[in-house]
Image: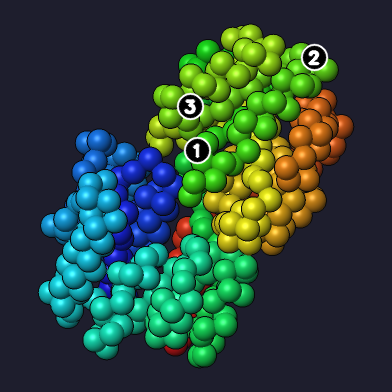
């Protein structure tokens, strides 16, 4: 199949969205499809080529629309102008490449309003990552050929609008090859200045998502509270902005930790696998909000499991639909005491850590990007 992927975000970017889009295009291509990624023009401090920045195979092409970038000027009017230019130029790109494409794919419902309205005779796929207004949702979901929801919660939300049974659930994917041919843990720890003999508890990711905190400050507080009980433990947090590193570092010191007890780093995409594999235990302390409870696809969880590390995770519906107690150690969200107990249990191996790791490694195989892409393409071919 010939797939045109319409993106509305800046690529490359520091967030998970850019990496996920690139990985999806890469995997669509790897399984035998021709893929063109269309991205908007956006002012970007990242000057590196997108393929190099993410370490992605150059097996698909990227086109850049000459869209207006007024996102951070002129307020809402600037946002509207930027959005409108993307919609129009995306539609014109479809018309220009009309004979060369079979499928139009996007994560942004606004990007397919015009092709749906004008009845473009191509298979159109909307991959839903969050909820939108009822009017927009009803219009898009009723008319696309396929809606790919990343969680069951999103499927249930959009099911009220669809009428043709055209909704499937496919969680975001993981690239397991990134953990192959990595240096030994000892070498990685020496590279980052982490004591080789310590039990490293890691959190890899951003401080916030969609304006919501992800539980990072609670991880720091819980670690500090049990550090005396687990003196051989060490805290690694990678994924912070410079100002976040400074403020969180001050909090660590105020809680009684020394610079020998923790390390705070920015997130460099190429180093993601190294950050994960330098750790012994990885933490996903997501709060119990509507987004995290129902609509979040835990991409980080797949990477954590695929790295062969023990995992502590919040007990939320969006995570429970992926894994069970045999694979991760669940904690009560928004409960620091629960997190403290989990850190101690994992650090002192009071739970079957090795068995959990083995179960997680086996289970995560079904969530690779290639497996995901094959299932989506099969649904499109069978439709």
Q: Nearer the viewer, residue 328 or 283?
A: 283
User: How much space separates mark 3 and mark 1, taking CA atoms?
Assistant: 10 Å
Q: Kindly check if marks 3 and 1 are in contact, taking CB atoms under 8 A apart as contact.
A: no
Residue denoted by label 2: 228
Circle 1 is placed at which residue position?
A: 206
Hey, which quadrant is residue 276 in on the image?
A: top right
Comparing marks 3 and 2, which lies closer to the viewer? 3
Residue 2 appears left or right of 254 = left
Residue where numbered disc 3 is placed:
244
Residue 182: percent from left, percent from top: 49, 31
Q: CA distance from mark 1 to mark 2?
A: 27 Å
**Quick one: which residue is furthest to the right in this view?**
350
Mark 3 vs mark 2: which is more N-terminal? 2
Residue 367 appears in the picture as rendered: no
Disc 1 element: loop
Q: Residues within 10 Å of mark 2 (few under 14, many from 20)?
A: few
Residue 218 picture location, percent across and down: 67, 32
């Amino acid at each position: 199949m010939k797939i045109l992927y319409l993106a509305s975000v800046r690529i490359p970017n520091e967030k998970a969205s850019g990496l996920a889009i690139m990985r999806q295009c890469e995997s669509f291509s790897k399984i035998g499809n021709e893929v063109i990624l269309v991205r908007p023009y956006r002012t970007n401090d990242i000057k590196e080529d997108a393929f190099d920045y993410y370490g992605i195979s150059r097996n698909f092409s990227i086109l850049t629309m000459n869209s207006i970038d007024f996102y951070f000027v002129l307020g809402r009017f600037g946002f509207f102008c930027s959005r409108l230019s993307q919609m129009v130029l995306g539609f014109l790109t479809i018309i220009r490449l009309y004979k060369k494409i079979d499928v139009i794919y996007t994560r942004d419902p606004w990007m397919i309003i015009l092709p749906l309205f004008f009845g473009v005779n191509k298979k159109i796929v909307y991959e839903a990552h969050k909820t939108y207004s009822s009017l927009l949702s009803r219009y898009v979901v009723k008319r696309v050929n396929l809606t790919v929801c990343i969680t069951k919660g999103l499927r249930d939300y959009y099911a009220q609008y669809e009428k043709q049974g055209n909704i499937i659930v496919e969680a975001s994917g993981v690239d397991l090859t990134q953990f192959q041919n990595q240096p030994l843990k000892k070498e990685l720890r020496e590279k980052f200045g982490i004591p080789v003999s310590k039990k490293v508890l890691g959190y890899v990711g951003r401080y916030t998502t969609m304006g919501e905190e992800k539980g990072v400050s609670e991880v720091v507080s819980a670690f500090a509270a049990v550090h005396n009980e687990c003196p051989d433990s060490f805290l690694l947090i990678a994924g912070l902005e410079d100002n976040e590193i400074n403020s969180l570092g001050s909090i660590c010191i105020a809680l009684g930790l020394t610079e020998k007890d923790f390390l705070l780093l920015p997130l460099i995409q190429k180093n993601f696998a190294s950050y994960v594999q330098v750790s012994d235990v990885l933490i996903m302390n997501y709060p119990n909000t509507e987004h995290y409870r129902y609509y979040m696809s835990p991409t980080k969880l797949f990477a954590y499991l695929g790295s062969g590390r023990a995992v502590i995770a919040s007990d939320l519906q969006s995570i429970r639909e992926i894994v069970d107690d045999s694979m991760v150690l669940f904690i009560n969200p928004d409960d620091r005491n629960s997190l403290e107990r989990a850190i101690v249990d994992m650090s002192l191996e009071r739970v079957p850590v090795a068995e959990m790791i083995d179960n997680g490694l086996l289970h995560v195989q079904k969530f690779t990007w290639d497996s995901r892409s094959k299932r989506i393409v099969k649904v499109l071919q069978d439709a």
